[in-house]
Amino acid sequence: MKHKLACRLAVTYGFLFILAIAVVDIALVSVYRASQLKKNEDYYINLSSILSSMAENNIRITNYITHGEGLADRRNGRVLLVDISGRVLLDSGGELSGTHLTNPEFRKTSQYGEPAAGYYTYDKKGMAMFSYPVSLSGRIGAVVLVSVYIQDIYDDVNRFAFRISTISIMVAIVVVAVSILMGRHLSDPITVLTDAVDKIYKGSMESAVEIKRNDEIGILAGAFNRMGSELQRIETGRKRFISDVSHELKTPLASIKALVEALLAEDTDSAECREYLQDINHEIDRLNGLVVSLLTSARLEEMTLKKESLCLADEVERTIRALQPLAIQKRISLYNNCSRDVVIYADKNMLREVLINLVDNSIKYGVDDGFVKIDCSYDSLRVTDNGPGIPEEEIDNIFDCFYRVDRSRSGESGNGIGLFVVKRIIEMHGFRISVSGRAGEGCIFTVEFGKSGAQGKLPNL
């Protein structure tokens, strides 16, 4: 079963080759047989023509016919001179003189005056008969008949066919063997890929295959390895997502439970009750924010983009006004460096979601008395800050759901869904987003929406 494909390929290619070579062999043998018979026929028709000419010129051919002169082998041949009525005038064998003949070759020659040839089997041997007209006074007066055994020609053709068949069988065996080897060379990588797919089906996401080929199978193997890496990344993300959701839900729920238990205590006064209720309200807000973020990320897969022409500078300005109070608290300056002639084609609400998340992220992780700059051109938008930056080993993960660089500040730095939502929106628009920077040097978020060409054209976002 392991090499089922290889066997099928071998059988298929072997059958096609054998069929092709059988057709070629039959053609070769037929051509060779026809060639040999034609040579023999030309010889005896020519002999018959000579005898006919001698008879037409009143040359005595009695001895010539009687002794079978001109025959390659008198024991295997016979010469007859037959008149127009079919009576045998002369017979080189001396047995048929005076008898009448009515064979097809004689009839054709006597009626139409044309040479004729016929092939028979006599005494299990091949035989040929040739006839040629003898013209007397302008009309057919007699017919020369020459009959010879041609079994040696048939035997020669059979030997030729046997040699050709033997060679063909040997070549066919080699071709089938090579087809099996080539089939295995083709099917073995497919078997490896099949086994790897089965391992992934059973839950093992680390099933990379080592197939290095410069053909479609090699491309398939490379695509499979990339798929396996992506599935492994997704599985890791899924597990982390479940863990993070559990953690995010567990923390406020544990706090709420502790506060409610304190409220149920008999020695709690009204002031403490009010404080506990405020704490409970704060934890409920955290839960609500988490649920809203989760719903937002889930709805993105179902939302339809409503694109329109937007002035990027205006959208950035609205974002700055919305987040100015938060920036003032941390004494962070916000700068809008976007030109008003930069117009993009995008979904307004989703674009605002991207801007708010990026700027809010820079403010939350920024340093006091720092800055956040928003620059844009016709093919990109950049959000730059001078905050603590992002460690190089963390950059590839910051767009994952629930991922936070500084987990110790989880209570005050959000739930790690914002940048995940940003990336999904960017991908829905056909953008690309990237981040650069080192720890302690700030970071730059860059959104690329494609080259817009000459000034005045709208970039397709």
Image (cartoon, helix red, strand yellow):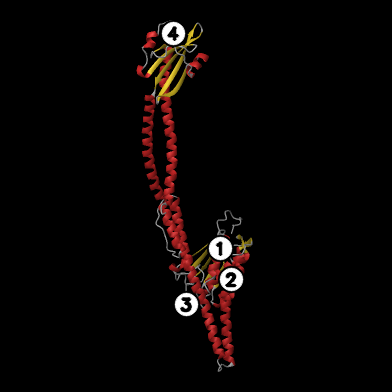
Kind of residue at disc 4: Ala
Spatial CA distance of label 4 from label 3 is 128 Å
Q: Secondary structure at mark 1?
A: helix
Query: Disc 2 marks which residue?
Result: 295
User: Between 235 and 426, which is closer to the camera in this rendering?
Assistant: 235
* Residue 425 seen in this snapshot: yes
Query: Disc 1 marks which residue?
Result: 426
Query: Disc 3 marks which residue?
Result: 408
The spot of residue 7 in percent (x, y) is 42, 48
Report if the CB atoms under discs 4 and 2 are less than 8 Å apart: no
First in sequence: mark 1 vs mark 3: 3
State the quadrant of the N terminus. bottom left
Spatial CA distance of label 1 from label 3 is 28 Å
The reply, left or right, for residue 316 in relation to residue 226 is right
Spatial CA distance of label 2 from label 3 is 25 Å
Spatial CA distance of label 4 from label 2 is 116 Å
- Name the front one of labels 4 and 2: 4
Kind of residue at disc 2: Leu
First in sequence: mark 1 vs mark 4: 4
Q: Secondary structure at mark 2?
A: helix
Kind of residue at disc 1: Ile
User: Vertically, is 239 above or below 82?
Assistant: below
State the quadrant of the C terminus. bottom right
Q: Secondary structure at mark 3?
A: helix
> How packed is label 4: few (under 14 Cα within 10 Å), some, or many (20 or more)?
many
Spatial CA distance of label 1 from label 2 is 18 Å
Query: Disc 4 marks which residue?
Result: 55
The spot of residue 326 in percent (x, y) is 57, 76
User: Vertically, is 39 above or below 269?
Assistant: above
